[in-house]
Amino acid sequence: MVNIIVEFSKYLLIVLMTVYTYSCFSVFRYEYEEDRQQILLRQNKLMFSIQLISYGVMYLKTGKTEIIFFYLAQVILFLAVIALYTILYPNVSRVVINNMCMLLSIGFIMILRLNTEKAIKQFIFVGISMIISLIVPVVIRKMKSLAEWTYIYAGVGLAALALVAVFAVTSGGAKLGFSVAGISIQPSEFVKISFVFFVAASLRKSTDFKNVVITTAIAAAHVLILVASTDLGAALILFVVYLIMLYVATKQPLYLAGGMLAGSGAAVIAYHLFRHIKVRVSVWKDPFATYETGGFQVAQSLFAIGTGGWLGMGLCQGSPESIPVAAEDFIFSAIVEELGLIFGLCLILVCVSCYIMFLNIAMQLRNRFYKLVALGLGTCYIFQVFLTIGGVTKFIPSTGVTLPLVSYGGSSILSTLIMFAIIQGLYILREDEEEIIERKRARQLRDERRREAFQKETRKRKTKKEEGYKQRIR
């Protein structure tokens, strides 16, 4: 009986996830707020249904009572997050909140399936990060001088990366961060945010050649320090983010072409300088030929994706624990093995819908600084998704970055939730701008009506005076 329930559940999970994904894009079609609210509430129901089915299946297969407690704690957390965001910020983007909670819930499900201890730690990370992220929209809304701190952002970012390059211990061929009281802190995750703010503040002031050269030099310093630390995934993200922001700010194709040419040359140099890059490229070419010398991870990832197929093996029916670092870098492979490629594709589309929302906010903001911040954070997010999924599917060489909000990792979770909170703050600013514009329009319309009424009354009085004058003459 349990096997029948598990088998049926995998089809039901795919259907629910497909409907949820469709709603992420269909919500943009509706103009009326009532119609949108219906879809947003349906998204919440779908998310909680996916959680209930997933944890129910895991409990039936394992019989562990901690699964029930974890499920209840998670439901309370998400209900609290949705309620607090809605109460504290009535103008918040519910689509972004729903997608954020959905991605976190999928991560919780798979991490608990892989490792209970890591799932509990992840829950604690998310809880703390949520509390911090709830404060961020207020900061964005109230602090009007954020655009003036150009070199503070640059100084903080460069200092943090330099500390890692000098003092951090090499792990997995790269210097990533420090361990404090048993908690690993990866500064490069937070430098992504300060980097975006620096570039946005600098390009807001001026896009003339001199300022572009200075901004490029400081941006290159960030990337070079990361290269020196052999944190090439983060270096690549910063490089692409800067290139996109520079092109959008200046509208100069020459800068884009020059950046791509410089990036290609740097990639060739890095290939010859760093041994582990040569290993990753050879693994990308043929992971099975290099199975014993570095291709094991990617090979196991491809085995897992192939085994899962379109519909997956079903929760607790596969063996995702055989994938190295499955809860971190290769969590997408674990998801596809047990929940199926269709579910995995829907997960990618949910991430894409987040990016579309970020771009939508960026395009409608009038403030140049905030517009560039929204663009930069959105690009940072979606490019990291591309690097992660591209690496585990052998589309590109593996870069060792995590899948935002889904993979296990405290620094990654906190930095991504801060990014989403900043976007929410910008969305609220946009709504505030719209309200101000609407009030101005209403005031102008009211003034025009008063003016017309006054002119009409004046004409009436004038007409009456003329008629009275004519009658007196007669």
Image: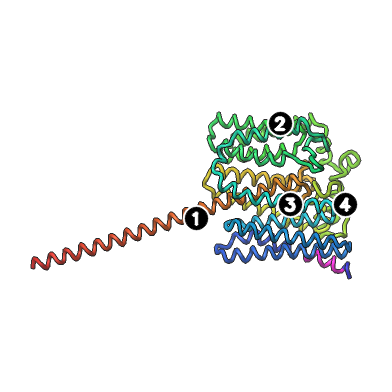
* Structural distance between the alpha carbons of marks 1 and 4: 51 Å
* Structural distance between the alpha carbons of marks 3 and 1: 33 Å
Viewer-proximal residue among 147 and 209: 147
Q: Which residue is mark 3?
A: 126
Q: Residues within 10 Å of mark 4 (few under 14, many from 20)?
A: few
| Position of residue 128 in the picture relative to residue 206 (left or right) | right
| First along the sequence among labels 3 and 1 | 3
| Position of residue 70 in the picture relative to residue 361 (left or right) | right
Q: Which residue is mark 1?
A: 435
Residue farthest to the front?
A: 181
Quadrant that contains the C terminus: bottom left
Q: Quadrant of residue 451?
A: bottom left
Q: Residues within 10 Å of mark 2 (few under 14, many from 20)?
A: some
Q: Which residue is mark 2?
A: 224
Does the magenta-highlighted stretch encompass residue 446? no
x, y (%) of residue 377? 64, 45
| First along the sequence among labels 4 and 2 | 2
| First along the sequence among labels 1 and 2 | 2
x, y (%) of residue 93? 61, 56
Viewer-proximal residue among 82 and 335: 82
Q: Which residue is mark 4?
A: 321
